[in-house]
Amino acid sequence: MMANGARNSPDNDELTTTLQQLDDVRQRTRAAVHPAWFPMLLFGLLGLASVPFALVGDGTWLGLYWFVAGPAGGFATSQYYRKRAITLGVGVRGGAYVAIGVALFVAASVAGAVTQSAAAPMMAIAVAYLGFARLERSWPVAGVSFVLGLAALVVGVTDPSYGDILLSLAFGLSFTATGLLLRRSDAPARATA
Amino acid sequence: MTEDSHPSQRLDDTVHQRVRLGILAVLTEADQADFAFLKDSLGLTDGNLSRHLQVLEEAGYVKVAKTFVGRRPRTWISATRAGRAAFGSELAALRELIAGVDRSGRQNGHG
């Protein structure tokens, strides 16, 4: 990468190569420690599974579903990250992730209980996932979260028929598709793990 | 050292070494990595990695913790705040050096 004498006579090509190699190392490490596909796919599938609950009643069943599925999904995600870190020998500490998960659970529960609709909790989910995207340094996650937030805002303002069902479907499909897409690029790390 | 000084004067002798730069590159992306991951990622031998980790640890740039997974010992390494700052400064100085050489090259080309 670099000769020890570079301090006195820095060679531009050598320095450029050094920076490129450092970028490569950082990108490989980043890919190993940020398997964002897992929570995207898991919560996307949970979102699709929630659609039948959105079809019945006044939203109480949907709320109860997420009251159980949300923490269960969070626990499964934490276990996956932990197991993967131990297997690969590299990982991130979970403090910030746990904080986002707890904040999301509280915000979505309160928003759902107060508004009795899926729009407000979905906005909380979108905001939380923007924070998650920041931690994971993932533009696809940020993009999907932003669009989900916009969709929730539109549904919240216009209050269309079947708004809860549409949002649950949009959430489930977009997160599942993003999760599957990200999973493909994570194949080398998963093969090692 | 002032911010106005030549970027080469801001290079840190401890960090400015290709293996140690690589170690800090991994550890600034991950909160912690184990010895084997660092060794494989950077293509090093046990002895070589140990030597460079010792230098970084003595400088206060990394922390080394030994744990057990079952009966197997495992060595986890993490960057300290000083290590992250030193790596960030080093990258900034290197980028500045490259930009400076590019600028002077263009000026000489037009002069």
Image (cartoon, helix red, strand yellow):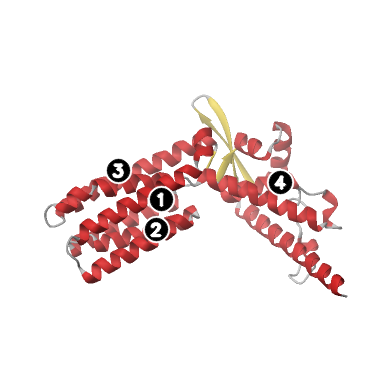
Amino acid at pointer 1 = Thr
Read off the chain for label 1. A
Contact check, label 1 and label 2, Cβ < 8 Å: yes
> Badge 1 is on which residue?
A178
Q: Position of residue A92 (x, y in %)?
A: 50, 46
The residue pinned by badge 4 equals B20
If you read the primary sequence from the N terminus, does the residue marked by circle 1 or circle 2 appear first?
2
Residue A4 visible (yes or no): yes
Circles 3 and 4 on the same chain: no
Q: SS at mark 1?
A: helix
Query: Residues under labels 4 and 1: Cα distance?
Result: 36 Å
Q: Nearer the viewer, mark 4 or mark 1?
A: 1
Label 3: which secondary element: helix
Q: CA distance from mark 1 to mark 2?
A: 8 Å
x and y percent of residue A112 in the render? Answer: 22, 60
Q: Nearer the viewer, mark 2 or mark 4?
A: 2
| Residue A144 numbered tag | 2
Answer few, some or many: residues within 10 Å of disc 3's Cα (few below 14, many 20 plus, some between 14 and 19). few
- The residue drawn where x is 33% and y is 56% is A104
- For the residues beneath circles 4 and 1, the answer to whether they share a chain is no
Q: Chain of mark 3?
A: A
